[in-house]
Image (cartoon, grey):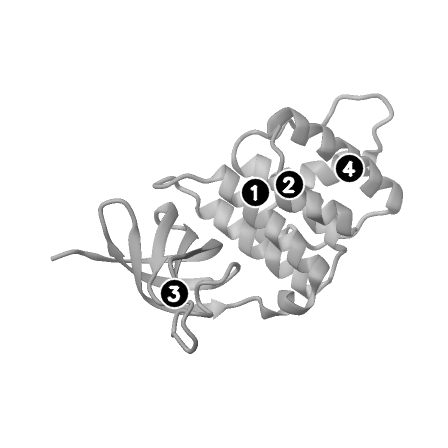
Amino acid sequence: MRDFVQVTGMVIKAVPVGEYDRAVTILTSQRGKISAFARNSRKMNNRFMAATNPFCFGTFKLLEGRTAYTIADAEISQYFEELRTDLEGAYYGMYFLEVADYYTRENNDDAEMLKLLYQSVRALIHKKIPNELVRLVFECKAMVVNGEFPGIPKKEGLLDTTAYTIQYIMDSSIEKLYTFTLREDVQKELAEIVKDYKKQVWNHDFHSLAFLENLC
């Protein structure tokens, strides 16, 4: 008899398989990034049709197989439906999903990355701070969570407020990240630093980022 497992996570990728199925990637707090099949989830009125779209966050009951899981049940607590009518927000969100996919691995402890992803997507729909600032904070904190952030740059003329902002992002809990705005000159300087750090640390082309930059 095969075992069932229950995980909490967010769907970060969904790919059609065959005529009616989907292969989904779920970032979970218990087992890192996992692959799962959603049988018949592309059939009209199937109970998994909505639950296996990107951004869906909730509890998934999975049947464990040799190389993948099969979704047996799903209780979605947040669909992030607001992104369906917000093209710019959706592109930012897809970029966040792609970064999470890039960083995470199966059976890793990725609870903090999942928390960062969830809070960052929430920030996009709540509109308390500009999307571009959400992106900069997300990029910085993603490097911090994965132990790759270079720290405050030692360069002449760095604005004190920029240095303070970077320190805040490094030290703050994820729940308190998206609680501030920046002057235009500070955000511009932060953007330049983050752009340089991404080249150093990631050196990776994200397809969704290219679409986002063309859109904005």
3 vs 2, front mark: 3
Image location (x, y in percent) of residue 168: 68, 41
Image location (x, y in percent) of residue 101: 50, 43
1 vs 4, front mark: 1
Q: Is residue 140 above or below residue 183?
A: above
Q: Residues within 10 Å of mark 3 (few under 14, many from 20)?
A: some
Q: How far, Cα to Cα, is label 1 from label 3?
A: 28 Å
**Marks 2 and 1 in Cβ contact (< 8 Å):** yes
Pointer 1 or 4: first along the chain? 1
In the displayed orientation, state which residue is furthest to the left: 1
Which one is in front, 186 or 132? 132
Which one is in front, 212 or 100? 212
Amino acid at the residue labelled 4: Leu
1 vs 3, front mark: 3
Q: Is residue 208 left or right of residue 116?
A: right
Image location (x, y in percent) of residue 167: 68, 36
Pointer 4 or 3: first along the chain? 3
Q: Mark 1 — residue? A: 99
**Marks 4 and 2 in Cβ contact (< 8 Å):** no
Pointer 4 or 2: first along the chain? 2
Q: Is residue 7 left or right of residue 53?
A: left
Q: How far, Cα to Cα, is label 4 from label 3?
A: 45 Å
Amino acid at the residue labelled 3: Tyr
Which one is in front, 48 or 125? 48
Q: Residue at x 40, y 50 (%)?
A: 29
Helix, strand or loop under label 2: helix
**Marks 1 and 4 in Cβ contact (< 8 Å):** no
Q: How far, Cα to Cα, is label 4 from label 2?
A: 11 Å
Q: Mark 3 — residue? A: 20
Q: Mark 2 — residue? A: 139
Pointer 2 or 1: first along the chain? 1
Quarter of the picture containing the N terminus is bottom left
